[in-house]
Every structure is written in C-alpha cells, then in structure tokens.
C-alpha cells in the first residue's frame, strides 16, 4: 500500500507581501510529504476563515481548492512521467479587510521504478492504416480536451471504491510497454482481470462525462468528479449510463469486456487529476475523509 506512510508535515513558510510589517503565517501541509511519480497527493491549507479565498499553483499550474477540515485542500496529480526532484509551489490566502498572506516552497517528487511489459498483439492493432490512425489521434484529442475541462464544483465525497468486485489488486500502472517489439507509451492505468459481464461500478460520486466507443479504449465511460478529477473505465462490454447523468459511488455503470485493444476481458481503470495520469491505486487509498 503506497499510501501507508502519509504523515502530517508542516512545510509552510510564510513569505510576506512587501507592505505587511508583521509576519503572518499560512499553515500548509502536504500529504504525503514526499509524493512519488503517479501519486495523488493533497495540500491542506489550515485555518482559512469563512469568506476567505485560497489560490495556489504547483509548477505554475493552478490548484483547485475546496473547503476541508476548517481550511481548504486541493488534490495534486503527479503525472507518471514528471521529472523527479524539486517542484515549486505557491499558496495565497485572500481575506476581505486583511493583507493577503502567502506561502511558497518546493515539493520533492520521488522516483518510482516501473515494470517493463512485453505484449504481442495482432499487427492490425499496432500498425494502423491512415484512416484508423486519424481516428485514434482524433479520439486522443477529444480525451485531452475533456481532461482539461474543470467542473468548478467538488462532486466526490469520502473514500474511493474499487470499480470491480474481484479480490486481486489492479496491475500494470506505468508499465513501459513493448508491443510486438516496439516501445510504446507507458500504461496509464491499472488492469483488473475479470470475466466478461462482471459489473463495473463508479469509484465515487460524479457526473458521466463521456460514453463512447473508441479504437484503443473500446467501449468506455469517463466520470467527472469535479475540480479536474476524472476516472476512466475502458474495454467495457456494455454501458448502463448516459452522458450528463449524475452517479453515486458504487452505482453500476457497465460490465467488463474486451472491446478496443485488449488481449482478453479486463477492466482498464484510470484516473486523471488536472490532466496528470495518476495511479488509481493511490486514489483508492486516499486518506482525505470528510
Ligand atoms: Zn490497461
């Protein structure tokens, strides 16, 4: 369990706006304090009075805050191909009638080694004809646009649940794939082997953002949990939801299949935070309880 070493480490350093004479601190904690590639991490800004707003960024990309435990929190996705090392963050708390309070620092992203996987697939799934190639590129573009769409409201609550009832953990996150002898992009999710027809459930509450049949992912459902968080369910045999519909955690959204580029029936489960590809296993272990 990757999430076992979560600690509360205060790393907030107050840096002041030039006009302020008294040092006013912003209490900030990262969970975990040193996230790894593929982790979902979160930043907790403590003691945020009602009526105050919090904004912040990591590597210049905006963070999306929501009220949490007397303060505000934001999820951060560490993309599986992020450069390990120091990444700069900034946070500002703005309250009416008060000097803005700011904090900044650097977050250290730790390495993680990923397995290598050799797969053999029918050559027609690897060497695409120009028409199929165009289709696949268009579909990837549609997904990229979708992941950038930020619903300004947090739709999820409580823990994330495994999308299939199988006892085994999902496998293969970040695997460097060599398909028919050629290196391909790393595997962005985890796979659960399960018989065709096994129900697939929503990992948390959200809105159905996309139901489609795409070349590589096959029949798919994507849920929007708000504030830039999405979960992805690929290679489905059937789908039982429609776009725009609100779903609760545990609601059946489809069944396991082997549509698209799949070697057998399984669920490919993915998760995106602010366009970063994260390990859904870390989302399932997220300790942010309210
Ligand atoms: Zn997969």
Image: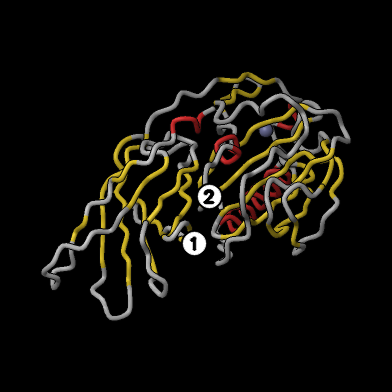
The image quadrant of residue 118 is top right
The residue depicted at 68 percent of the width and 43 percent of the height is 133
Q: Is residue 147 left or right of residue 232?
A: left
The answer to whether the beta carbon of the residue marked 1 is less than 8 Å from any atom of ligand 1 is no
User: Nearest the camera: 201 or 151?
Assistant: 201
Closer to the N terminus: mark 2 or mark 1? 1
Q: Residue at x 73, y 39 (%)?
A: 163
Tell me the crowding category of disc 2: few under 14, some 14 to 19, or many 20 or more residues within 10 angstroms, Cα based.
Answer: many
| Spot occupied by residue 30 in the image (x, y as percentages of width and height) | 38, 45
> Any atom of ligand 1 within 8 Å of the CB at mark 2?
no
Disc 1 is placed on an element classified as strand
- Say whether residue 254 is left or right of residue 278: right
- Image check: 268 left or right of 62? right
- State how far apart marks 2 and 1 are (Cα): 14 Å
Q: Quadrant of residue 188?
A: top right
| Count of marks overlaid on the render | 2
Q: Nearer the viewer, residue 194 or 160?
A: 160
The label number, if any, that marks residue 66 in the structure image = 1
Query: Ligand 1 falls in which quarter?
Result: top right
Residue at 48% from the left image edge and 46% from the top image edge: 77
Query: What residue is disc 2 on?
Result: 273
Q: Position of residue 79 (x, y in %)?
A: 47, 41
Check disc 2 and report its element: helix, strand or loop.
Answer: strand
Q: Position of residue 23 (x, y in %)?
A: 16, 62
């Amino acid at each position: 369990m990757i999430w076992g070493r979560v600690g509360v480490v205060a790393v907030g350093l107050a840096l002041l706006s030039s006009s302020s004479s008294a040092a006013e601190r912003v209490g900030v904690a990262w969970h975990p304090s040193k996230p790894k590639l593929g982790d979902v991490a979160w930043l907790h800004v403590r003691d945020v009075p009602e009526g105050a707003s919090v904004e912040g960024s990591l590597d210049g990309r905006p963070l999306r805050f929501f009220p949490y435990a007397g303060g505000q929190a934001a999820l951060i996705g560490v993309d599986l191909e992020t450069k390990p090392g120091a990444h700069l963050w900034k946070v500002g708390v703005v309250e009416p009638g008060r000097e803005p309070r700011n904090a900044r620092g650097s977050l250290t992203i730790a390495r993680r080694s990923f397995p290598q996987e050799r797969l053999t697939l029918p050559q027609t799934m690897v060497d695409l004809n120009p028409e199929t190639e165009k289709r696949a590129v268009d579909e990837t573009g549609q997904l990229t646009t979708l992941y950038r769409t930020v619903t300004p409201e947090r739709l999820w609550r409580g823990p994330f649940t495994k999308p299939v009832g199988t006892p085994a953990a999902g496998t293969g996150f970040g695997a460097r794939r060599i398909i028919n002898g050629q290196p391909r992009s790393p595997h962005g999710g985890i796979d659960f082997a399960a018989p065709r027809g096994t129900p697939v459930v929503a990992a948390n509450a959200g809105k159905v953002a996309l139901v489609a049949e795409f070349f590589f992912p096959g029949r798919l459902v994507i849920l929007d949990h708000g504030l830039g968080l999405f979960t992805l369910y690929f290679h489905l045999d059937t789908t039982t939801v429609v776009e725009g519909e609100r779903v609760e955690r545990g609601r059946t959204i489809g069944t396991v299949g082997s549509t698209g580029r799949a070697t057998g029936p399984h669920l490919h489960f993915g998760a995106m935070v602010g366009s970063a590809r994260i390990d859904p296993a870390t989302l399932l272990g997220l300790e942010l309880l309210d």
